[in-house]
Every structure is written in C-alpha cells, then in structure tokens.
Amino acid sequence: MLIETHAHIDDKQFDSDRDEVIARANSFGVEKIINIGAGLGSSQRSVALAEKYDNIFCSIGLHPHYFMEYGEKSFDKIFEFKSLATSKKLVAIGEIGLDYFIPDGNIITKEQKELQKRGFMLQLEFAKELKLPVILHCRGSRPVVPSAYREAEDSYEDILEIILNFPKLNFVWHSFGGRLAFTEKVLAKENMLFSFSGNITYNKPNAEIFEVLRKIPIEKIMLETDCPYLAPVPMRGKRNEPAFVKYVAQKIAEVKNLELEDAAKITTVNAENFFGIKTIN
C-alpha cells in the first residue's frame, strides 16, 4: 500500500496512455496519487484529472519558473489561479517555492529572485486562507566553481526564512536535496516533512543524501516520483510513472534498515495525515 505524493500525469508525455498508467500504478500497490500543479495550465489540468479519477487528488501551484517566464504579467493570473480552489479534491498548494538554477547557464539576478519571492509569498497567503498544506519546490543556484557542490543552498535558506512567518501551515520539502546541516534546521520545526524521489537511487553509497535520510525519522518522510522526470533505478532513462514509486520505497527502506512493508505503511500514514486523505479499504 503506497501513496504517490508528487506526480505530473497531466504532462503531455502521458496523453497516449494515461488510463493505462493510472491502472498500472494501482496494480503496483499505489492506491492514491497526488497530481501536482506547476503553472496555471497544469493546475487546471491537475484539478480536471482529480475530478475524473476517484484515486487521484490534486494540488494547484505556480512554480517559481512561472514567474520568471511571464514576469510581472504572471501576477495578473493570480485571480484565475485562485478560482481553481473550489475543487473538493484539492489537498494542497504547490509546487511553489524558489528555484535559483537557471537552465540556460546564466546566474540568477537579484531582481529575478525578488520576483520569485513575491509569487511565493502570495501563494503562501492563499494557502493560509484555505488552511491547506504546502508543497515546496526548492533548487539552489548554479555553483560559480564547477567543482563545487552541485547546487548552492541559497534558495533553501531563503525559503526557510520566509516560511517561518507561517507557523500554522504544514510544509513538505518536495524531492528534498538539502545538506545535513540544513536538514537539522528543518527537523527542528514540527510543521515540516520531507519527500524523496527516484534521484536518491542514483547516488553512491557514501553520498550525503543517505546521511540525510538516516537522520530524518521515517515518520517525517513521504514518497514521490516527480514523474515523468527522475525515473529511479532500474528504470532510469525511461519515462517515469507513479508505479515506480515502489523503487523509491525500496531504497528508503534499505537506507533506514526497515522492512519494505513497514516503510510503505508508515509513509502512507504520513501522507494520509499531511494531505487529509484516506486510502481505499
């Protein structure tokens, strides 16, 4: 029994076989799927999917790159975004946050960071109004020195500083990649959980991410695929899908020295409580 807490099955990569993908997930023991909004269009599709399928719930959110792409015009879409909140299948706001990694190789500017922060805080206020949990997207800026750690932690620190102003909201750090020292800061907060995706299966045995996993209590962990991206080993290189969340569960169970069944049960309860959902009997 598994809950896939972060999927993008509204993506066009699933247009030809979406029904089969959803059925296959169920056959692999995935009883609930949270489909994630990452822009106005994808949030609309996420709500539509949840309304169509009994075992799918949805979140709505404007990804930080949405504000980068549309600039000041993105704020004109907030009213339209908020109109999606009438769905009874809506269980979270997200994925929202800060992303300082610019795909074209440039270094993010101060102005671009401030634009993202404005969009992020607007959505946090909306989550506060709706009393919904928040799914955080966080990616640090490109390291100036190529040999440095794969990404800086500037966005992590900025997000933490902002969300500390919302103590009544619950947060999950999606596809968490923070270092051990930062993890300890987050663990000090009762209202914050972590979710992990298939990229944890790519790392060498001595990677810091496994120290992080061992540090986090299993009661604070949820499972995700972030499909169609980040397919786990042994499916790496293929299109990811919700059924593959079992490989993430297996890796977490291995690192935490747990039976797979126990890891699945505990992370399922974590997701039920965080999103306010119940699994199929």
Image (cartoon, rainbow, N blue to C red):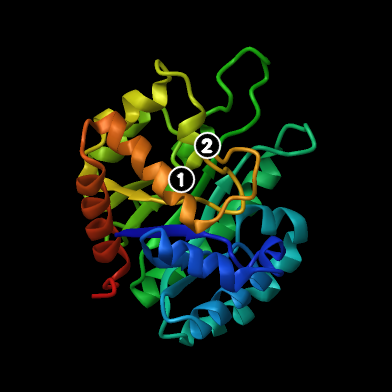
Residue corresponding to mark 2: 234
Q: Nearer the viewer, residue 20 or 14?
A: 20
**Residue lying at the far top of the rendered structure:** 147
Q: Which quadrant holds the N terminus?
A: bottom left
Q: Residues within 10 Å of mark 1 (few under 14, many from 20)?
A: some
Which residue: 57% across, 81% down? 48
- Which image quadrant for residue 70? bottom right
Vertical order, 68 against 189 (above or below) = below
Residue corresponding to mark 1: 159
Position of 273 with respect to 210 (left or right) is left
Which of marks 1 and 2 precedes in the sequence? 1
Viewer-side label of 2, 1: 2
Q: Nearer the viewer, residue 209 or 261?
A: 261
Which residue: 76% across, 56% down? 69
Q: What's the distance in space between the residues labelled 2 and 1, CA to CA?
A: 33 Å
- x and y, in percent, of residue 264 in the image: 27, 51
